[in-house]
Image (tube, rainbow, N blue to C red):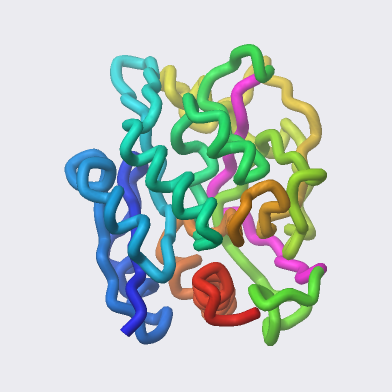
Amino acid sequence: MRALLVLSGGHPYEAGPFDELLASLGDWEITHLVHPEGGEADAAGAIREAHALLFYDMAGYSFGEGAVSTRPPSPALREAIAARFASGKGAVAMHHAIAGWAEWPQWHAWLGGQFHYQPGPHGLDSGYRHDVAYTAQVIADHPVTRGLPARFPVTDELYLCPIDETALTPLIRAEGFAFTAGNFYSAAQAVAGAMFSNAGWEHPQGSNCVAWESRTCPAPLVYLQCGDGPATYANPHVRQLLAQALDYTSGATP
């Protein structure tokens, strides 16, 4: 049986519905490690050995008293991920994984984007918006999208954050919703206690690409922005998309 390693933690999610999503993905022997208790300390060997790897984590953060602090990954974890990619073994990163490891630039260079909780040298903090009903438009004939409808409905959280489309191959775009500052809330204001606020916050218009394959990672690396909660976990098209992404990045499909 093929081995699937799932890394989660650092961001809340509904465990039961997420486990149902994992169970729907096919014939996998699943190992699920959670940051920080097990994900970082125990993952290095498993990362090297697993046939497929799913990042559903947002590691490297501590939140409290209206502030956020960050830390880099351990050398062992960083080296294990880099060695996996160098060997040609790929991975899937999902939803809030684009925010994880804020202090590891190489991770975000591979991924092609980064969600920022705080302003800094990169510019402004990023934006979020829950429960957006949009149309996912498949724009590439690719093993990850093959067999999906050309357009299908999704209700999920979207991000307004820097995405480098020169570093990726777009697979799906979100249609029917404008990626402009007025449609999103400030992550920094949420950390400070003002949830769902964008008062005085400005952000450049962002990319509506919500699924892509990296062009900079030495192994197949697919990012799927969908994945915030039970409605998305249960969406049959999202399940197909994730299952095919895991197959593709594990080498099971060309």
- Tell me what residue is drawn at x 33 percent, y 73 percent: 3
**Position of 207 relative to 199 (above/below):** below
Q: Is residue 125 magenta?
A: yes
State left or right for residue 131 relative to residue 182. left
- Tell me what residue is drawn at x 34 percent, y 41 percent: 77
Nearest the eye: 189 or 215: 215
- Tell me what residue is drawn at x 59 percent, y 58 percent: 219
Q: Quadrant of the N terminus?
A: bottom left
The residue sitting at the left extreme is 37
Q: Quadrant of the C terminus?
A: bottom right
State left or right for residue 66 relative to residue 97. left
Q: Residue 253: image x %, image y %? A: 60, 81
**Residue 148 location, quadrant:** bottom right
Q: Which residues are magenta?
A: 124-139
Nearest the eye: 153 or 204: 204
Nearest the eye: 192 or 102: 102
**How many discs appear?**
0
The residue sitting at the front extreme is 87
Q: Is residue 138 magenta?
A: yes
Nearest the eye: 201 or 105: 105
- Tell me what residue is drawn at x 26 percent, y 47 percent: 39
Q: Main secondary structure of the magenta part?
A: strand
**Position of 98 relative to 185 (above/below):** below
**Residue 172 location, quadrant:** bottom right
**Residue 11 location, quadrant:** top left
**Position of 214 relative to 108 (above/below):** below
Q: Residue 66: image x %, image y %? A: 37, 16
Q: Residue 133: image x %, image y %? A: 64, 60
Q: Residue 236: image x %, image y %? A: 53, 80
